[in-house]
Image (cartoon, rainbow, N blue to C red):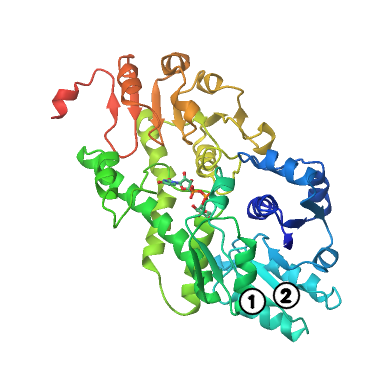
Amino acid sequence: MRLTIIGTGYVGLVAAVCFAKLGHFVTAIDREHVIQDLRENKLAIWEPDLQEMLETCHKEGRLSFDTNVAKASKDADALMIAVGTPTGVNGQTDLSQVDDVIAQLKHAGGVCPPFIIMKSTVPVGTCDELEANLLHAGLQTEVVFNPEFLRQGSAINDFMNPDRIVFGCRSHLAKAALHQLYKGINAPIQVCDRRSAELIKYASNAFLAMKISFANMIADVCEGYGADNRQVMQGVGTDRRIGPHFLREGIGYGGSCFSKDLQSLLASGKAIARSLPLLEATAQINDERIPQLLEKLISLWGNPRGKRLGVLGLSFKPNTNDMRDAPFLTLLRLCYLYGIEVQTFDPVVQSTSIERVIQMETAYEAAAGADAIIIMTEWPQFAELDWLLMVQLMHQPILLDGRNVLSDEIISRLLMVDNMIYIPVGRAMERAGYDILSKI
Ligand code: UDX
């Protein structure tokens, strides 16, 4: 098929290379400077395998780049919209980038492919409205909703091996076109109406966020009663009705989707006079994670002003340099408020991307002179550091393991260091010299 994809952000670019890899001819559209870089195989995002796949598909002529929507849509079998749909006023979704694409199509002089596939996450009812809007302008097309469930850091793998593919469409022709587009991907396909498809995306993300907040809520109870949330969630998650995933306690969820989609769903509820208290609680629990963790450090320090905090991991999860809605940004804001100095290390986030942070070349430099270290991201290499050396380099040996990265063996060795304090999430804080037997 000839597919034009508008928007080369995370979803658009990953879809472009994956559909090209599946044998389709893909033209990806974006603004001039973005396209210029992509034509030279330069990527703004760091994602495993993406660079290699981009270069291969580009070289083999299955992937090209353009800036002109009308030109690239002229002979396309389908046009896919993968532009950003950020949070706008009052939590509502800002659809201005989608509207822009529609305006360009309207001005293209009657050029519109038979199918417009909406990949961007849009509020329920949007596809119906867009189709009516285009029809009104004399453009005959079917708008299809085809949500994307890929996760950053494993985007290519998730795209090629999804748990399911959802087609929200009206006609058999659209369904057949989507089947052809996804030929080669082995996954169950659910075909449904567009509004249900639009809600599937929101409900899935809301449910996952809810699972994480639930795990974090129980983690707080574990801390209060000396239980271990990892054990609790293992016991809970082995029930097949619940499932083991997304029950990892920690610093809370970040990233461009969960928070944005929760807000959008809450706004959709409000628009029909429905409150959605489960979602409100999910967001509230998440918002409290970082302030709560920082409070633990402050209670140990006494006065936080002038203290130096070493931070390991800046992005919202490993294997990405994406800082959108990263919990680190909340931490940073609070640190400035309390007068805490911040020195950081991240394996992939570029030093130029964040202001007012002393960014180090190694984890050891981020530990040097610190009054505490906080692990924000579960990069596997953080578990492999020479932790005894890390602690020796610090001014005060306090480690807040926000993702429970350290093994029991490392922790027990660390607790032999004088004055060492290890603060995990979802179980009791451990201090050097404190007799574990006295807890029983
Ligand atoms: C998410 C959805 O998983 C994906 O389906 C959707 O398309 C986009 O949003 P993503 O944001 O890339 O994907 O990452 P994900 O792996 O879902 O993690 C989101 C956040 O939740 C991260 O900050 C992660 O650290 C956190 N998380 C995840 C937890 O705190 N605990 C968990 O058990 C799982």
Which is more N-terminal, label 1 or label 2?
2
Q: Which residue is mark 1?
A: 173
Q: CA distance from mark 2 to mark 1?
A: 10 Å
Which element carries disc 1, helix, strand or loop? helix
In the image, residue 365 above or below residue 128: above
Q: Looking at the rendering, in which quadrant would you find the N terminus?
A: bottom right
* Residue found 54% across the figure and 30% down from its top: 341
* Residue found 31% across the figure and 25% down from its top: 408
Q: Looking at the rendering, in which quadrant would you find the C terminus?
A: top left
Residue 45 location (% of width, % of height): 67, 43
In-front residue for pair 183/226: 183
In-front residue for pair 84/439: 84
Residue 286 location (% of width, % of height): 42, 51
Q: Which residue is mark 2?
A: 114
In-front residue for pair 55/135: 55
- In the picture, measured across the screen, residue 201 lies left or right of residue 217, that is right
The amino acid on which the numbered mark 2 sits, given as a three-letter code, is: Pro
Instruction: Locate residue 19: give its quadrant.
Output: bottom right
Q: Report whether residue 307 is seen.
A: no
* Residue found 48% across the figure and 22% down from its top: 370
- In the picture, measured across the screen, residue 69 lies left or right of residue 192, that is right
Whether label 2 touches label 1, CB < 8 Å = yes
The amino acid on which the numbered mark 1 sits, given as a three-letter code, is: Leu
